[in-house]
Image: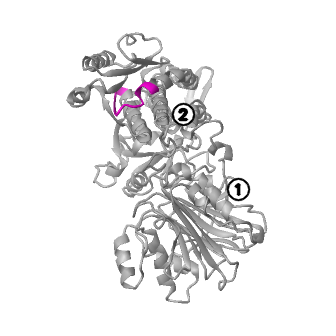
Amino acid sequence: KSQRSTPRASFPRGASATRSDMCGIVAYLGNDHATPFLVGGLKRLEYRGYDSAGVALLVGGSSKDGAHFEVVKRAGKVANLESVLPSHTNGSRPTIGIAHTRWATHGPPTDINAHPHLSQNGRIAVVHNGVIENYAALREQLTRKGYTPISQTDTELFAHLIEDVQRTGGLPLDAVVRQALTQVQGAFGIAVLSLDDPDTLIGARRGSPLIMGVSDPNAEEHEQSFFLASDASAVVEHTRHVLYFEDSEMVVIRRRRGYELMTLANVTLSREVQQLELSLAQIQKGNYKHFMLKEISEQPDALQTTMRGRISVDGGHASIHFGGLDPLMDRLAGARRFVFCACGTSWHAALVGEYLIEQLAGINVEVEYASEFRYRKPILARREVEEDVVFVISQSGETADTLAAAQYARSKGLLALGICNVVGSSIARETDAGIYLHAGPEIGVASTKAFTAQITVLTMLALKLGRYRGEISEERYDEHVRELLSLPEKMRDIFAQSDKIYEMSRVYRYAHNFLYLGRGYCFPVALEGALKLKEISYIHAEGYAAAEMKHGPIALIDEFMPVVVIAPRSDATYDKLRSNIQEVLARRGSVIAITESDNNDLDADCEYVIKIPHVSDFLTPILSVLPLQLMSYYIADMRGCNVDQPRNLAKSVTVE
């Protein structure tokens, strides 16, 4: 059977960008030496966090009798692996191979647990992203059949399972892999090689992203090279022609015969190759020491790109357009409630969105941790009038819990909308419509520019809904939009204070604990500031609504506890924030204040005062977070931490 398949075109302005996952897959089949492609791809995937790496090269040409695997695996960085790889200078250069960066789930980061893994007979090699949920049952089943796993990983079971199916005889490799996958519960993105079919590379996915790169779609099949990767950054150096796979799909790539796309139910599919918008320069550090610093600095340009083509000012009157949501404005404006589901930094952006939409548009908003939303029984309204609308927010568009929240909402018949940065991601395909951030690739594990871009999109949405519902007058709407357009230049004014923030960071780099306080729009910024510091510097930090300080955290304050207070005078509770500062000072705490450039009230009392340009209260989160990002970066760098790849963290959490 044959079926034409086109990804859901719910999000506007499409063309593919980079993707993220917790582990990294790279595979190559072509006419050139495979090793440089594999190692180069692994290096491009390092930004997401990993603890070991490995390569399996199929050596010996197209004869299955002479073919064998060369497998090299090392705990630690890709450089450790690269230093021990065979050079293949004697003319026997392998032209097919698979490689992997692992983020440990089953078993610690060791050479043995690193991928790729071989079957017991040594004739099948597998790399795998994701988690096998029925791992224990499969391990017991295979052990009873005489298989002896040598690692603690769930991935090794894939290799044994494929060998076990292959023993039944008579099935081609793609049918063997499909049948093996029917026994697996959980998420996977895999690449498979077999010595019995040495000119074939197989990839499959369910719940974990996987793409295929083609060197030149117009070339003769015998001239083409093919790549599999979990992230477009691994292939963009070699091609910008890519094919995205949907859930439960498989690709079979054969040398000199091209590729065949099919479902795991063996339905042949046809899909056009897409052109990447991502460029190599976007995923390089340039002159910056770290990707995180580069991405912090890129925020003025990122905000301009996020707003470009969506905000227009004609004859003094402003308008906001969202290609994906404009047809749904009646439903959104009439909704009973918005439910925002997100994780981590995106959850903090959603909290800002709650304030924005409730205060500017007059629509009730609930913010949920996606991981909790999907496992309880939320009370959701599905009506023709006053329905609930679920928004899912994720930088990568691949966050497992957030994706599952969208799928749950749609299964209940609700309108599910997405806000994400990565074009072509799973959330973009699994939601009814949505908004792309277009903030550009974010390589550093700690999110920065995606956070401010998310708030910018939510601000535009709140203003558009507020005007649509009559909550905001046309005059105020125009003023607000023009003020929003001015933010990129105001961000640059804050970066002019980088030296002051650097010197302040030197003072606090040895602190063991931090407390962050804010109210209203800036309460979520306090949470985000604390998260940034703890995830890259490993300093314990907590964020609180400032009024909650007296309900416990005040017990921690002494001369060794720096307290960051976000206290813009535009905040309706500014006087109460000043009282909070005095309470900290009375207990000999050290206060760092964030306030407007025209406010000198705090200069005498606080250890440091970082000034931001004056803006309306609803825009302060976008500016007030910048000094906190810089402080976190500088402190982490001074402490010798791996800023771009913090320990135990991954760029996108695609497993539970």
- Disc 2 residue type (three-letter): Ile
Q: Quadrant of the N terminus?
A: bottom right
Q: Secondary structure at mark 2?
A: helix
Q: How many marks?
A: 2
x, y percentage for residue 119? 50, 78
Q: Residue at x 44, y 60 (%)?
A: 109
Question: What residue range appears in magenta?
Answer: 505-520
Label 1 is placed on what type of residue? His
| Circle nearer the N terminus (1, 2) | 1
Q: Position of residue 13 (x, y in %)?
A: 61, 45
Residue 75 lies left or right of residue 61; in this view the side is left
Choose between 72 and 520: the one closer to the eye.
Answer: 72
Label 1: which residue? 238
Is residue 80 shown in magenta? Answer: no
The answer to whether 553 appears left or right of 122 in the picture is left
Please tell me whether residue 518 belongs to the stretch shown in magenta. Answer: yes
Report the residue marked by disc 2: 296
Residue drawn at point x = 47 percent, y = 83 percent: 164
Q: Residue furthest front?
A: 84
* Residue 629 position (above or below residue 97): above
Q: Is residue 48 visible?
A: yes
Residue found at the very far bottom of the displayed protein: 169
- Provide residue 367's location: percent of width, then percent of height: 35, 41
User: How far apart are labels 1 and 2 at the CA level?
Assistant: 28 Å
Residue 232 appearing in the image: no
Discs 1, 2 touching: Cβ within 8 Å: no
Q: Quadrant of residue 539?
A: top left
**In the picture shown, does residue 430 fall above or below 365?**
below
Q: Nearer the viewer, residue 623 or 336?
A: 623
